[in-house]
Image (tube, rainbow, N blue to C red):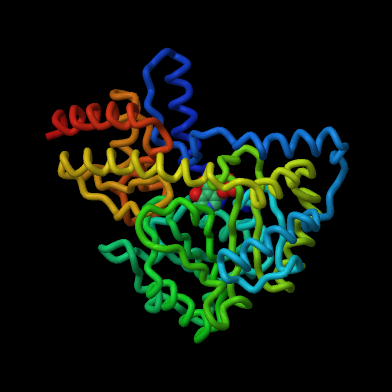
């Protein structure tokens, strides 16, 4: 069997494609399926890329990323995240997704188990399978803030993936849970992959980087990106921070696959990290406003949802099969959402709403949802 036969196409992309098709047919589609900020990249970042292009930064770059950007990333994670990294601990990648893929290829051996907290972002399972590993899904408890991962650790456990703030549930894990994961990693000798791509998009709670905990730097692969923080999804720029041995293995894979992330895009990354950060504040306060409108509407409809502390998602329980709900909500009410079935097996009645859309669209979606639920009752 081909390795590609082990994985399914991304559930989020399938819905978006259908939503786009309906829109082309002239339907008034509200897209709450998308996982990307609906903001433009700040002008100073765009200008830095243009300048790099004009200056001829159009040739191959070092496989691990240009030194100035790796230096800027190391400085950022030292100052903001308490991670004791130097540029040798940093690899620049084509988005966070490729950092995750490469890190799994570098670390996972055939048969190794990787614990994923369910519901889990769609691509973790695929990356584990493509590396020959075995995904082990562990359900969150009913608070969505913790999970009994200790019950699922075996001698084959190689890694636990923790994503905070979380996609699709929007939760920011409390420090006690992250500490528990770190202590288990130290006791049992496995890696933690800390996916921190939403670290700046937090409304309630505080972000903690597991790699900053005592003794965890060597055991943690921290994943981050420019995509969500700076509205740069299409630029494909992310990075991983880890011990040098892991980074060296990732660099080998990168040198034989994509060679390096796009050269002039890396200069934009420097401008993003070193430039004015007020865009991020404005974006986060707009997301907070939308979250509040959405949550109030769901409360009025009596719908159950996970605590939306951060990122830009609400994970809600529809009370019916999530595939059927998503299909009918799109085909009959022209609202695109992502079915929970795409994020694991235990949340078959839940769907993810992305509020990377206007307050007006959120209000309109709530009205359509009310009508849909009335008809179902
Ligand atoms: C949790 C999580 N990790 C990683 C990614 C991938 O980010 P990038 O676009 O930088 O590859 C996403 C994007 O949706 C995400 O939600």
Residue 290 lies, with reference to residue 65, above or below; the image says above
In this view, the residue farthest toward the bottom is 187
Q: Nearer the viewer, residue 228 or 274?
A: 274
Residue found at x 35% / y 73% = 148
Q: Quadrant of residue 71?
A: bottom right
Residue 107 lies, with reference to residue 263, above or below; the image says below
**Residue 306 x/y as whole percent:** 29, 54
**Residue 368 x/y as whole percent:** 24, 27
**Residue 142 x/y as whole percent:** 25, 63
Residue 68 lies, with reference to residue 218, above or below; the image says above
Residue 284 lies, with reference to residue 174, above or below; the image says above
Residue found at x 79% / y 62% = 252
Residue 68 located left or right of residue 29: right
In this view, the residue farthest toward the left is 377
**Residue 17 x/y as whole percent:** 49, 29
Visible in this render: residue 7? no
Q: Nearer the viewer, residue 240 or 265?
A: 265
Residue 311 located left or right of residue 235: left
Quarter of the C terminus within the rendering: top left
Residue 217 located left or right of residue 28: right
Q: Nearer the viewer, residue 244 or 276?
A: 276
Residue found at x 88% / y 37% = 56
């Amino acid at each position: 069997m081909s390795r590609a036969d082990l994985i399914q196409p991304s559930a989020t992309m399938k819905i978006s494609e259908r939503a786009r098709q309906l829109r082309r047919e002239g339907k008034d589609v509200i897209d709450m399926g998308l996982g990307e900020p609906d903001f433009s990249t700040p002008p100073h970042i765009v200008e830095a890329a243009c300048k790099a292009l004009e200056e001829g930064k159009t040739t191959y770059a070092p496989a691990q990323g240009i030194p100035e950007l790796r230096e800027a990333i190391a400085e950022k994670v030292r100052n903001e995240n308490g991670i004791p990294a130097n540029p040798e601990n940093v690899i620049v990648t084509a988005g966070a997704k490729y950092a995750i893929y490469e890190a799994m290829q570098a670390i996972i051996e055939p048969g190794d188990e990787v614990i994923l907290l369910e519901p889990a972002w769609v691509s973790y399972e695929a990356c584990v399978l493509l590396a020959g590993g075995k995904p082990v899904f562990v359900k969150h408890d009913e608070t969505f803030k913790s999970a009994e991962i200790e019950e699922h650790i075996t001698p084959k456990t190689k890694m636990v993936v923790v994503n905070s703030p979380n996609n699709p549930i929007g939760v920011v894990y409390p420090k006690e849970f992250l500490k528990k994961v770190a202590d288990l990693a130290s006791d049992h000798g496995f890696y933690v992959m800390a996916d921190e791509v939403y670290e700046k998009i937090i409304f309630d709670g505080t972000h903690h980087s597991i790699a900053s905990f005592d003794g965890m730097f060597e055991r943690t692969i921290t994943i981050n990106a420019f995509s969500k923080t700076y509205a740069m999804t299409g630029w494909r720029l992310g990075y991983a921070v880890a011990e040098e041995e892991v980074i060296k293995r990732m660099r080998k894979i990168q040198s034989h696959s994509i060679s390096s992330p796009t050269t002039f895009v890396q200069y934009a990354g420097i401008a993003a990290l070193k430039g004015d950060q007020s865009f991020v504040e404005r974006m986060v306060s707009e997301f907070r406003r939308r979250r509040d409108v959405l949550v109030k509407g769901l409360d009025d409809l009596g719908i159950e949802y996970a605590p939306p502390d951060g990122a830009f998602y609400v994970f809600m329980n529809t009370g019916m099969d999530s595939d059927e709900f998503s299909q009918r909500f799109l085909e009959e009410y022209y609202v695109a959402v992502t079915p929970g079935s795409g994020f694991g097996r235990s949340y078959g009645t839940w769907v993810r709403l992305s509020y990377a859309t206007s307050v007006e669209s959120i209000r309109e979606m709530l009205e359509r949802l009310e009508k849909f639920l009335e008809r179902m009752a």
